[in-house]
Amino acid sequence: MAERAPPMADEAVEDAAQPRRSRLIFLVPVLIFAGLAALFMARLSAGGDPSRLPSALIGRAAPAFALPPLDGQRDGGGAPLPGLSGADLTGGRVTVMNVWASWCAPCRIEHPVLMELARDPSFRLVGINYKDKEENARRFLGTFGNPFAAVGVDGTGRTAIEFGVYGVPETFVIGPDGTIRHKHVGPLTPDSLPGFLAEVRKAGGR
């Protein structure tokens, strides 16, 4: 019976490298996560507010977009609620634009704050429904109330990407000239509301 030939030198090196390569592949996501966690903790220890993530769009005109309305929604007078476009973000008043979804648990926590904001006539509150099923979005607003003067349906998420949205909810303050003045990441809460409203007043020149 013929003897089995010993492995070639290159094959032996390759076999020895396999476990090392597997360990490296496993460690890469762990190292990335550890780096992000360290950055987050550094921001907190330095007194940074994680809801105030920097945005390259602050101080720039809002991106051009046009979103269809969420069917079945009506304003206080019974008229169909409109969709949302970039042109709607100009016109003499500050706009507060909230990006939300029915599947987003923090959006439910935030919603009573939005209902309170809707009572303030000094700005216009509008919404972008992000990657949602329209029937679920309608059910959400039917259950918790509709604070929005307009709702645009962003089924693909493309408009949210144009605005640099990290995840829902996020809320933008847009000046009367259509310039993005402030971005709040995460749910608005009673604790964060005073600071947020200060940004709204600042955007309106008050």
Image (cartoon, helix red, strand yellow):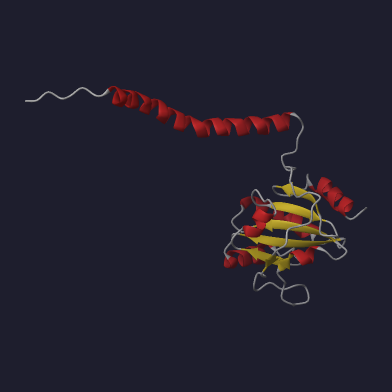
Residue at horizontal 75 percent and vertical 58 percent from the top: 97
The percent coordinates of residue 53 (x first, y second) are 72, 42
Q: Is residue 4 above or below residue 200?
A: above
Q: In this rendering, would 110 be left or right of 17?
A: right
Instruction: Give the number of callouts.
Output: 0
Residue at horizontal 89 percent and vertical 55 percent from the top: 204
Q: Quadrant of residue 139?
A: bottom right
The percent coordinates of residue 123 (x first, y second) are 84, 60
Q: In which quarter of the image is the N terminus?
A: top left
Q: Quadrant of residue 163?
A: bottom right
Q: In this view, does 195 lie above or below 112?
A: above
Q: In this rendering, would 58 be left or right of 155?
A: right
The percent coordinates of residue 148 (x first, y second) are 74, 64
Q: Is residue 32 above or below residue 155?
A: above
Q: Nearer the viewer, residue 160 or 50?
A: 160
- The single residue placed furthest to the left in the displayed view is 1
Visible in this render: residue 125?
A: yes
The percent coordinates of residue 150 (x first, y second) are 74, 67
Visible in this render: residue 189?
A: no
Q: In this view, does 9 lie above or below 75?
A: above
Residue at horizontal 66 percent and vertical 67 percent from the top: 142
Q: In this rendering, would 27 be left or right of 157?
A: left
